[in-house]
Amino acid sequence: MSSTLVRRLLWVLLAAGILGAGVWWIKKPKPIAVVAVEIAQGKVESSVANTRAGTVEACQRTKLSTTMGGRIEVLAVKEGDRVKKGQLLMKLWNDDQQAQSNVASTQVETARKRMAEACTVAANAEKEAQRQSALLAQGFISSSREEQVRSEAQARRAGCDAATSDVVQTQARLKATRVEQSRTVLYAPFAGTVAKVVGEVGEYSTPSPPGVPTPPAIDLIDDTCMYVKAPMDEVDAPKIQPGQLVRISFDALPKQSFAGTVRRVAPYVSAIEKQARTVDIEAVLTPTDNDPRLLVGYSADVEVVLAVRESVLRVPTSAIQEGNTVLLAGGDGVLVQRTIKTGLSNWEFTEVLEGLSAGDKVITSLEREGVKVGASYVLDSKAGSK
């Protein structure tokens, strides 16, 4: 074989190799850009949160109505007013009851005067009876005379007792008229803010009869003491105890969280929806120098902290797959799978007991297409490692 032929054959083989390498390069799977988090130590909490939005409630709130209907004569407050305990809120027309009360008051005064007169006469008669008894003992009068005077004194005393009873009776009548008057007025049972007023002066106010819901005349709120009431899943209820720490957030105050404690856990299950049975808890904010200004009715979320572990190896919870497995960025540029043993967990982090070491890079971009065991990867430079 001539040298020319050999050189041609070598060139053909070289061209075929280059062509094959080019085809292989073109068909070679491209590395997938992934986001990885380097495993390190930190704090992990176990917590539970409410299933539906909670609500800010007032420690004291009362919806007041008069115990009898009538025309509104005095409306002493308006919505938003702050009132003191015992302050007049509303009064119905009750001139007829006031007239009856005046009559009863006059009768009491008259009865007292009659009692004073009758009891004075009775006292004098008793003194006279004592004097007559002394005269009888000395033989100056007859026994019939002494008996007559003593009987008259007893009668006078009975008249005094009857007059005293009349006073008690007229006082009871006066008290009854005042009770009737109290049924037409509303006073603040505690200091607070008027949230709602139903009715205007001159309108007829009607109390709510049994079985017929009627809006209250005055809705009074004590906004100096408030708490958050939140429904928790019945499965989580046994884990929650009064005194546990909570984090409270409000829709009206976004991107803020406030520390608090569990005040009360309801001793029963609410079954508003058959498939969503819940247990209500009450949580209060821990007092600080910068307490938020809350309004009754704010929606709120409560996260109850069940346990806390400090300085433990942790992995983002979103990186854990079914079967407690995670994908790691292997040193040879290929994704590998690792089974781990976990401890405390929440929506953000999970404690790692076995299977990972500090510095391992766990893949968090599991939603990207092609991210699986054995796939080639490159770290996403835009996302970067955290």
Image (spheres, rainbow, N blue to C red):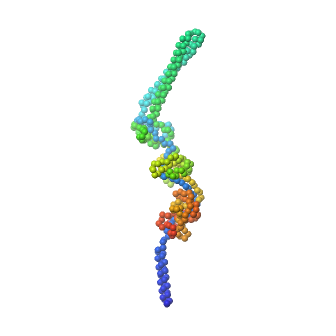
18 relative position to 312: left or right:
left
Q: Residue at x 54, y 13 (%)?
A: 147
- Picture quarter with the C terminus: bottom right
**Which residue corresponds to the image point at 43% horizontal and 39% vertical from the top-left?**
210
- Res 290 visible: no
Foreground pick, 142 / 58: 142
Q: Is residue 43 visible?
A: yes
- The percent coordinates of residue 302 (x first, y second) are 51, 51
Q: Position of residue 114 (x, y in %)?
A: 49, 21
Nearest the viewer among 177 and 370 is 370
Residue 114's place in the image compared with 178, above or below, is above
Residue farthest to the bottom, as pictured: 2
Asked if 308 appears above or below 62 in the picture, the reply is: below
Count of numbered tags: 0
Image quadrant of residue 95?
top left
State the image quarter where residue 338 is shown: bottom right
Which percent across, then down, holds residue 101?
A: 45, 29
Of all residues shown, which one is farthest toward the left?
A: 203
Q: Residue at x 51, y 23 (%)?
A: 164
Q: Is residue 196 above or below residue 36?
A: above
Residue 223: % across, % down: 50, 44
Find the residue positioned furthest to the top: 140
